[in-house]
Structure formats: structure tokens, C-alpha cells
């Protein structure tokens, strides 16, 4: 999905919320916002995915502020919460099997996509506790449901590429990866970011939640980009992209990119996400945010 003109105020709101939450001096805040505004004005033709512009302004923030990992405390709290939820859910899944188990895990993975301290429309002051409470309300919802088709395709796949999204939810993703490997002994390769950007999960976060305990391998998708960048992807990621029998992607930013580049990919692409803006939920014919499990 290419960015819309309506994405501009959202991008500005996001970076302003980030700047305000970091406790920076006013002069630094102004310098960051000035450069972000200049960048957006120079790129107002909006010929790339929204994630490109969000990545760019957050890189400006990191460079000017000198903070290599912004929101480190929030990121760690999300990972702690994700690990706790993973343990609770694993116990609940003990008596389930087959499609019932698979569909339950997928719904929780999508609910986990709301475990995001920078969720659009709530800002960086959205409390971690409030997010956790909201997950239980979301876990039974699935407005766009391709689960049977996804289950069949995953069941015949020998090599699966799993593209993660946020900190915290990657711990819940472990349950799905474990289940995918149990379906037919397939290999599942997990891809995370090489550097911190907003709430996206990095290799350090993967280590904190012990992602390698369930994934066949964990690779870097690329540097500090919001979602995947087809311009900056690593050679390892490109190789897995070309060789996977099916690709699982998490989150709206990855939906932006994979929906735009789907014709370049030979494998089925599964997108699991909680929508966070009208430009995405309207694609599916809805008028408010929804849970989506779709093959594109």
C-alpha cells in the first residue's frame, strides 16, 4: 500500500508523540521536528509505503537525539508482558489440537499485535497495562478470516518464513511457530530487525524472549526499518523470501510492504494484523479497526 496524503498528519503525530515522550530539551525537539517537516515537504509526492516515511523520521529522531534505542524501558516492559502471556496461553492450549489449536493461536497472535506502545490513535502515553487488558477483548475477534486456507497451505509447507513485528508480541508468536513446526516438521525461519525503530522487534528482543528455542533459525531482515524494507533487506532475508513455501507476516507495516510487492513473490503471503487506520481497514470493506488473517 502506497502512502496517502492523509498519512502525513499521522506520521507527524507519531513523531511528535515520540519526541515528547523522551524528555528531550526543547531545542532538540524543535531541531528534530524541523528536519522531519523538511523531509516530508521534500517527499510530499508520497510514492512509497507509509513505513518508509515513518522509518525516516524516526531515524532523524535517533540521529539528532543521540539515543540509539529509544523507548528502551517500554520495549522491555512489552517483552516481559509478552513472556508472561506466552506462559499463560501455553497452558490453555494444552488440551487443544488440530485446526482448533491452530486457529486459537493465530487469534491470540493477532490480538498480540495490539501489544504496541505506539499504536496509532493512542500515542506513546498508552499504558502497558491498558494494552494487556485490551488483548483479552480482541482475542476472540477475527473479522477477515482465511484460517482454513492458511491452515491447509501451512500444513503442506516445508519451509516457512515468519516476519515478526513488535516487541512483546514476538513472545506470543513463539506459540504459532511451535505449532507450525508440529504440523509437518517444517522449518520456520524467524526474521527480526537489525536495529531498534519505534516498537519493532530486534535480534536483542528475540534473544530476550528466547525465540531461537522454537524457530529453526533467527535472521536479520535488514537494519532499523519499520516493518520490512524491500530496498534495505538483508541478503539472508532475500534468500529466504525466494525459497519459502509460505510467508507469515505480522503487523500493519509489513502489510503495507507485502501487499505492494506481492507480485514479486512466488509464495502465498499470510498477513496477520490488527488494523490501526482507516486506509487499511477500508481495504477490507470495514469502517473501524479489525483483526485480519488474510492470504494476499
Image: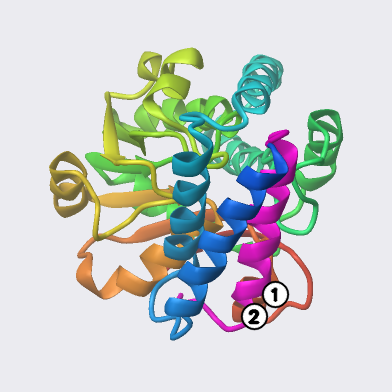
Label 1 neighbourhood size at 10 Å, few (<14), some (14-19), many (20+)? few
Where is 205 relative to 127, above or below?
A: above
Q: Please state, as top left, top right, bottom left or bottom right, where the C terminus lies in the image.
A: bottom left
Whether residue 43 is visible, yes or no, is: no
- 176 with respect to 79 (left or right): left
Q: Which residues are magenta?
A: 1-24
* Residue under numbered circle 2: 6
Residue visible at 60% across and 39% down in the picture:
109
Label 2 neighbourhood size at 10 Å, few (<14), some (14-19), many (20+)? few
User: Could you give the CA–CA distance between mark 1 and mark 2, rounded to whole angstroms?
Assistant: 10 Å
Measuring from the top left, give residue 122's x and y in whole percent.
Answer: 80, 52
Whether residue 59 is visible, yes or no, is: yes
Residue visible at 51% across and 17% down in the picture:
209
Name the disc covering residue 278, or none: 1
Measuring from the top left, give residue 15's x and y in whole percent.
Answer: 63, 54
Badge 1 vs badge 2, beta-carbon distance below 8 Å? yes
User: Mostly what secondary structure, the magenta segment?
Assistant: helix
Question: Magenta segment: does it hold 234?
Answer: no
Which sits in the foreground, 277 or 69?
69
Where is 194 relative to 51, above or below?
A: above
Circle nearer the N terminus (1, 2): 2
Where is 94 relative to 254, above or below?
A: above
Q: Secondary structure at mark 2?
A: loop
Q: Quadrant of residue 83?
A: top right
Residue furthest front as drawn: 27
Question: Magenta segment: does it hold 18?
Answer: yes
Q: How many marks?
A: 2
- 39 with respect to 143 (left or right): left
Where is 136 relative to 282, above or below?
A: above
Measuring from the top left, give residue 55's x and y in whole percent.
Answer: 45, 54
Amino acid at each position: 500500500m502506497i502512502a496517502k496524503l492523509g498519512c502525513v498528519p499521522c506520521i507527524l503525530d507519531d513523531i511528535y508523540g515520540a519526541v515528547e515522550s523522551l524528555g528531550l530539551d526543547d531545542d532538540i525537539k524543535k531541531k528534530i521536528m524541523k528536519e522531519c517537516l523538511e523531509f516530508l515537504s521534500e517527499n510530499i509526492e508520497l510514492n512509497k509505503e507509509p513505513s518508509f516515511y515513518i522509518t525516516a523520521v524516526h531515524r532523524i529522531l535517533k540521529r539528532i537525539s543521540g539515543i540509539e534505542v529509544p523507548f528502551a524501558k517500554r520495549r522491555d516492559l512489552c517483552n516481559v508482558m509478552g513472556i508472561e502471556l506466552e506462559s499463560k496461553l501455553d497452558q490453555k492450549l494444552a488440551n487443544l489440537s488440530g485446526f482448533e489449536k491452530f486457529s486459537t493461536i493465530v487469534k491470540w497472535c493477532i490480538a498480540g499485535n495490539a501489544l504496541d506502545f505506539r499504536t496509532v490513535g493512542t500515542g506513546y502515553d498508552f499504558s502497558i497495562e491498558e494494552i494487556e487488558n485490551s488483548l483479552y477483548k480482541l482475542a476472540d475477534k477475527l473479522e477477515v478470516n482465511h484460517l482454513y486456507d492458511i491452515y491447509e497451505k501451512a500444513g503442506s509447507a516445508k519451509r516457512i518464513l515468519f516476519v515478526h513485528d513488535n516487541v512483546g508480541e514476538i513472545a506470543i508468536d513463539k506459540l504459532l511457530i511451535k505449532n507450525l513446526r508440529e504440523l509437518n516438521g517444517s522449518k520456520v525461519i524467524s526474521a527480526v530487525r537489525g536495529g531498534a525503530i519505534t516498537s519493532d522487534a530486534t535480534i536483542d528482543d528475540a534473544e530476550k524472549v528466547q525465540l531461537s528455542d522454537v524457530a529453526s533459525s533467527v535472521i536479520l531482515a535488514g537494519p532499523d526499518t519499520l516493518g520490512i524494507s524491500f530496498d534495505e533487506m538483508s541478503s539472508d532475508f532475500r534468500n529466504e523470501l525466494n525459497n519459502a513455501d509460505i510467508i507469515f507476516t505480522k503487523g500493519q507495516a509489513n502489510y503495507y510492504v507485502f501487499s505492494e510487492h506481492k507480485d514479486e513473490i512466488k509464495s502465498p503471503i499470510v498477513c496477520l494484523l490488527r488494523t490501526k487506520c482507516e486506509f487499511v481497514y477500508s481495504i477490507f470493506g470495514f469502517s473501524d479497526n479489525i483483526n485480519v488473517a488474510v492470504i494476499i
